[in-house]
Structures are given as structure tokens and as C-alpha cells.
Image: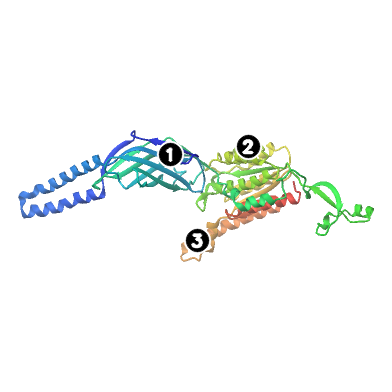
Amino acid sequence: MHPHRAATRAARAGRLMFYPTGRAIGLIALGAPIAAIFAAIIPALWAIGAAWAAMLLLLLLLDGLIAAKARDVRLAIPQSAEIGAPMTLAAEASFSGLMVPQRIFGNLGVDHRLADSGKIEFALARIAGSAAFAGEATTIPGRRGTGEIGKFWLRWKGPLGLAWRQIAQPSAQTVAVIPNIAAVRSPTVQMFLRDSVFGLMARKFRGEGSEFEALADYQPGMDRRSIDWKGSARHSKLLAKEYDTERNNQIVFALDCGSAMCEPIDGLPRIDRAVSAALLTAYVTLKSGDKTSLFSFAAKPELSTPFLSGSRNFFRLQQEAATIDYRHQESNYTLALSSLQNRLKRRSLIIIFTDFTDPTAADLMLEAAGRLIDKHLVLFVILEDQELRAIIDKAPESAEDVARSVTAQNLHNQKNLVISRLQHLGIDVIEGAHDEIGTRLINGYLKIKRRGAL
């Protein structure tokens, strides 16, 4: 058993029951036509059918009684799992009796966060040289939150193969389904952060940012725009301005968790794709020395964390992001963004993850965003709807396909119109597929840092 897993022990307290196997049902059913044939030939033999069924029922009961007995059952589950990532559960069981089976089958009842079907199936194989069995099962959590574990069922056949013996054991365990941060652990990101010029070592970094640091001799390869012409004229040599890299900026990740963001993309809700991209970028912002906060909203503001700094607080951000719920409500941009604006006391970079299909809601969003850019730098992140693009690109085969394609194209055009209006307001917009949006957002953040826009 792995030390990071919680184990449930279920010995003799489980509910025990018998029921027939497919073989027993087939044999009982076979007795009916045989008895009918005998009764047609010799009417006095009509009782053979009843005797056949009674004999099989007796054998079935005997098979269930002499079957092996479960003495110790253990279920090991992780205390937490990441959404969209495989989660492995392990089960062990030991048996006593003369006729120990070769294979045990299990079923674990879970809620919809852990498995869409509501159950996870196990197959336990016998450990060589013992009466113990072990097996594993894998599931992929589909929603964040607390996943509940229900009853754990085990069943095995008797030695005659006529009866299933089954036990059921309740479990009160839970699994915390947290946001997926696999991208943060990727070697590419770790190598990038190791070589990044932002905040990994306690020394000054010059050459970028907007805070003037010093004058230095101009070297080939420097940006010509950094040349201080007046200073160069006074000293009769080319001098260039050096700037200290800015730190301690405020970065806010504002996540829309309304109905539009609850729609799935490639099997997971948009909000979960957005949370993963936000956490990936938040890891970089914390490493860069900037203060980072999470903010979520739907019909009203939901989550608002304090500004955190330092990579040691990344785990806290991940835990806070796990509490962002799925709200099947229309998002109130006016209330949410005005509340966020009142909370911020200094210029900040506000990264808004959202999606829009309703033109009226989009107009309200544009109006609320327009008020933010007077004091803050705003960046919108929009997930590309690949399903919508596939409908548009598909060659129509019927009138229904044509209507579907036209509707999809209209929705796509409306979305592009809103993006254009955002850009006309001076707001940067990043749009991309869910598997590349995190990288694009990091690049956008670093670009803002390089040009000293904050």
C-alpha cells in the first residue's frame, strides 16, 4: 500500500449475499425443454423438470456456502487527484477456505466527479503462493470538488461455478479533485524558469523594465533606442540607459465561472481549462516576484484571494482555485468587474478568462472592461471553440448540415466582432486552443514585462 493513500479496511462486517451465475441460470433453463420432452413421451415423468430445478438450486446454495470467505479487504485511494489526469485506486483482499478462487471482481461506487458512470470496476488477481488478491483500477476525474466514495463490492464464484458470493462494504472516504498543474511540472517549463531572467536569483537584472538604473557604455547588440544621446554628447562616447527589471507588480487572474464557461472542451469544462492555464501562468508570476491573486465570478463575485508572492504560495493558490464552483448562471460583468476595481488600490494587470455567446452580455462586458482600462492593464483570454470550427469546416451533406454550419458561422462572426471591439479599446486578447493557451498567456505576460507596461 502506498503511504500517500488512505486505506479502508473491511473485514467481516460487509453485507453477504448469494446469487446464481450465468451457468446456473442456463442449466436451470435447460431443464425445462428436457422435462417437456420426457412428459410428452411418458406423462408420468413430468416431475423430472421440477426435480432438476430443485437439485440445481440445492447445488447453487451448497456452492455459495463452501465458496471461499473474505477475511480482510482493503481499498487504497489517493487523498487528492488532478482533474483530467488518471487516478489509480488499489484493492487488496485475503480469503480463507479450501476452494479459493483464482479471480475476484470488484465494483466501487463513486460520484460523478470521479467517474461519469458512477462506478469503477476492479479485477483482482491472486498473488502467487498465497490466498491474497490484489488489483488496480484507473479513472479520470471530470470535475473539481470533493469526490465521494460509496460502497465497495466484491464478488467471486464458488468452486462449482454456479453461485456468485458477494460482499458490500460502505466507505466514507473522499477524494479532493484539484486543478490540473501537469504543465507546471513539465520539463520545458522548469527549464524555462531556470533560464528565465525573472526573479530566480537574488540579484539585479538590468536591461529591461522601465525603472532607470544607470548609464553604461553602449555595446553592439544593445537596443539603439536605449542610447542616451545627450549623455553621449557630454562624454564624447556612446552611452546607453539601463533599466532595472520591475518586480512586485500586482497580477489578478479573473475567472468567469458562469454558464458559458461550464460548457465542455475536449471532455472538460472550459473553466477547468482556464484554471489550469491561470495556475501555469501564476507559477511564473510568483517566480518573477510579482504579487498574484485569484478572482472568480458568475452572477456575483465568488472568490477573491489576497495578493500572494513567492513560489511557496503556489500550493495555496492551487487549493483556492479548487474551490471555484460551476455556476449555471449568466455572468454579471458589471457587478464583478466593478467590485474588482474597487478592491484594487494600485495599477494592476487583470487577466480575464471568459467566453461570450450572448450579444447583450458581450456589450455589458465591453462597457465594464472599458472602465477598467482607465487605471489598469487588461488582458482577455478566450478559449478557441474547436467544435464550432469543425462544424463550420465540415462539408455539408444535407440541408440540416447547411443550417448548422450557417448558425455556427454567425456565432463565430459575433465572437470575432467582440474581440475586435476589445482590441479597439486597447485591450489585448489572447485566443487559442486549450492545450496551448497557457504557453501563449505566459508569452503575453513576459511581453508586458519586457515593455514595462505596468
Secondary structure of the residue carrying numbered label 2 = loop
**Residue at 59 percent of width and 48 percent of height:** 185
Q: Nearer the viewer, residue 447 or 408?
A: 447
Question: Residue 149 — which label?
Answer: 1
Q: What residue type is disc 2 on?
A: Thr
Disc 2: which residue: 305
Q: How is the image coloured?
A: rainbow
Disc 3: which residue: 403
Q: Spatial distance from mark 3 to mark 2, Cα to Cα?
A: 45 Å
Give the label, 3 or 2, closer to the camera.
Answer: 2
Q: Quadrant of the N terminus?
A: top left
Q: Residue furthest top?
A: 13
Give the label, 2 or 1, closer to the camera.
Answer: 1
Residue 237 image-quadrant placement: bottom right
Secondary structure of the residue carrying numbered label 1 = strand
Q: Is residue 17 left or right of residue 233?
A: left
Within-10-Å neighbours for mark 2: few <14, some 14–19, many 20+: some
Give the label, 3 or 1, closer to the camera.
Answer: 1
